[in-house]
Amino acid sequence: MSTSLLLISTEAGVRTITINRPDKLNALNSATLDALHQAFGEAAGDDAVRVIVLTGAGEKAFVAGADISEMNTLSAVQGRDFSLRGQRMMRFVEKMPKPVIAAINGFALGGGLELAMCCHLRIAADNAKLGQPEINLGLIPGFGGSQRLLRLAGRAATLEMCLTGAPITAERARELGVVNRVVPAAELAAETGKLAASLANAAPLALRAMLDCIHIGGECGIEEGLEYESAQFGLMFSTEDMREGTGAFLEKRKPVFQGR
Ligand code: COA
């Protein structure tokens, strides 16, 4: 299935969603935000989808930010609504019950970095540039950037990036913990594919429980986080996948997980 704003394909449990506005460096306008929200909703509800890869069309950009031409004419109320629209979509991505990998194939600026930071794993091409340049537009990040960058990279790096607006290299982003891996640009698709394939073969319910634990743990105290982990751990004993995984180990064979 494909629409003009997004290209969507599925192969061996991996759904690839490609933001498809290469002539505008995949800038996020309202229609693209809504299309992404819908596409992630469909991926969440489709049992054939085990992993989602998000990337940008073309050679230059993952996403070069929220659409500046759309923002230029917004009123204060419309600006707040635009922010909420993006935040809702990105929170939905962050809370997806399946792993989401951002393949950062170039500029990830403003809303592009914010979108990448909602994904669970980030692989960047070595020529990618990442930043929060909103200050250069008389703006601030509006899709969660000030909050998520702070949590990923810490206060000093976040202040520097947001106050100066200067982009950083992929390698610097890896040093700061903003991306997981940096690979040569020509190998980005293949390396992302390998990671996605390994996750597509993992136990889906355990992946989901792990994502939940890590999100909850990032947002609550240690006691509540540990309690939640125990509850999720116990829940795994009701799954066929847990019997399959432990049984396959004991029988010295590869497990086949069904998501049950
Ligand atoms: N919103 C809307 N359009 C954008 C855009 C954005 N965030 N980023 C790029 N575009 C458009 C450009 O206006 C241009 O359109 P045009 O051909 O109709 O004029 C097209 O994408 C190509 O961009 P261009 O600036 O010509 O490419 P470049 O290689 O010279 O520069 C960037 C690349 C990323 C450095 C530059 O496009 C840029 O600074 N973009 C804005 C980044 C930003 O501030 N993002 C945060 C927004 S809150």
Image (cartoon, helix red, strand yellow):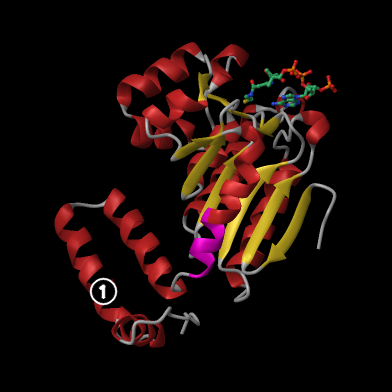
Nearer the observer, 167 or 147: 167
Write the start and end of the magenta stretch as one range.
195-201
Report the residue marked by disc 1.
233
Residue 104 image offset from top left, x and y in percent: 59, 37
Q: Is residue 49 left or right of residue 218?
A: right
Residue 153 image offset from top left, x and y in percent: 36, 30
Relative vertical location of residue 114 with respect to residue 109 in this rendering, above or below = below
Rendered-image quadrant of the N terminus: bottom right
Q: Secondary structure at mark 1?
A: helix
Image label count: 1
Ligand 1 picture quarter: top right
Nearer the observer, 156 or 33: 156
Relative vertical location of residue 170 with respect to residue 148 in this rendering, above or below = above
Relative vertical location of residue 150 with respect to residue 260 in this rendering, above or below = above
Q: Residue 196 lies in magenta, yes or no?
A: yes
Residue 26 image offset from top left, x and y in percent: 73, 35
**Residue at the front extreme?**
252
Residue at left offset 68%, top offset 59%: 39
Mark 1, other Cα within 10 Å: few <14 / some 14–19 / many ≥20 = some
Residue 174 image offset from top left, x and y in percent: 42, 31
Quadrant housing residue 40: bottom right
Label 1 sits on what residue type? Answer: Phe
Residue at left offset 83%, top offset 54%: 3
User: Is most of the magenta stretch helix, strand or loop?
Assistant: helix
